[in-house]
Image (spheres, grey):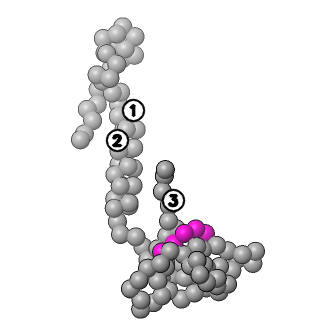
């Protein structure tokens, strides 16, 4: 959808010749079109398949999907960093203080309730 641009004088609005919502000023139109493009890009980003990260590419703490290389099963894992900046990894059963080999997808966004 393309927005129509109308140039009009401030006196036109002051006199009430343009009802609210009937016209969009040129500068407002450009801002709205930029916002529409930003939202389209965000939608495409969200629709894209998630990027699979190696352990050394994980830079943010949080929940991740994790799988061992060669395995087809993904598990949920909690990733965080200790005081020295070492990657700490927990899958709920094991706690590892080293960078594990494997693949990660995340960090995951918690659901809104």
Q: Image height check: is 44 above or below 81?
A: above
| Residue that appears at 43% across and 79% down | 74
> Where residue 104 is drawn, which disc sits there?
none
Q: Is residue 58 visible?
A: no
* Residue 52, percent from left and from top: 44, 77
Q: How many marks?
A: 3
Crowding at mark 2 (Cα within 10 Å: few <14, some 14-19, many 20+): some
Tag 1 residue = 27
Residue at which label 3 appears: 110
Mark 1 residue element: helix
Instruction: Assign a secondary structure to mark 3.
Output: loop
Q: In the image, which is nearer the foreground, mark 3 or mark 2?
A: 3
Cα distance between the residues tagged 1 and 2: 10 Å
Q: Position of residue 82 (x, y in %)?
A: 72, 75
Residue 1, position as x, y percentages in the image: 23, 41
Give the answer, above or below, for where 107 lies relative to 74.
Answer: above
**Mark toward the start of the polypeptide (3 vs 2):** 2
Query: What are the residue bounds of the magenta stretch?
Result: 60-65
User: Vertical placement of 112 versus 79: above or below?
Assistant: above
- The residues tagged by marks 3 and 1 sit, at their Cα atoms, a distance apart of 37 Å
Residue found at the very far right of the displayed protein: 83
Which label was assigned to residue 33? 2
| Type of secondary structure dominating the magenta stretch | strand
| Left/right of residue 106 with respect to residue 7 in the rendered view | right
Which residue is depicted at the point 51% across and 59% down? 110
Taking the image as drawn, is residue 90 in sight? Answer: yes
Judge from the rendering whether residue 33 lies leftward or rightward of residue 103; answer left or right. Answer: left
Assess whether mark 2 and mark 3 are in contact (beta carbons under 8 angstroms).
no
Residue 90 in magenta stretch: no
């Amino acid at each position: 959808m393309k927005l129509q641009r109308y140039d009009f004088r401030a006196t036109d609005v002051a006199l009430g010749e343009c009802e609210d919502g009937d016209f969009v000023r040129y500068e407002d139109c450009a801002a709205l079109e930029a916002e529409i493009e930003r939202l389209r890009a965000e939608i495409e980003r969200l629709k894209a398949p998630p990027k699979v990260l190696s352990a050394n590419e994980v830079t943010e703490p949080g929940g991740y999907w994790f799988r061992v290389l060669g395995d087809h099963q993904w598990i949920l894992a909690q990733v965080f960093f200790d005081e020295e900046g070492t990657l700490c990894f927990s899958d709920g059963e094991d706690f590892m203080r080293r960078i594990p080999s494997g693949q990660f997808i995340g960090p995951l966004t918690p659901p809104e309730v």
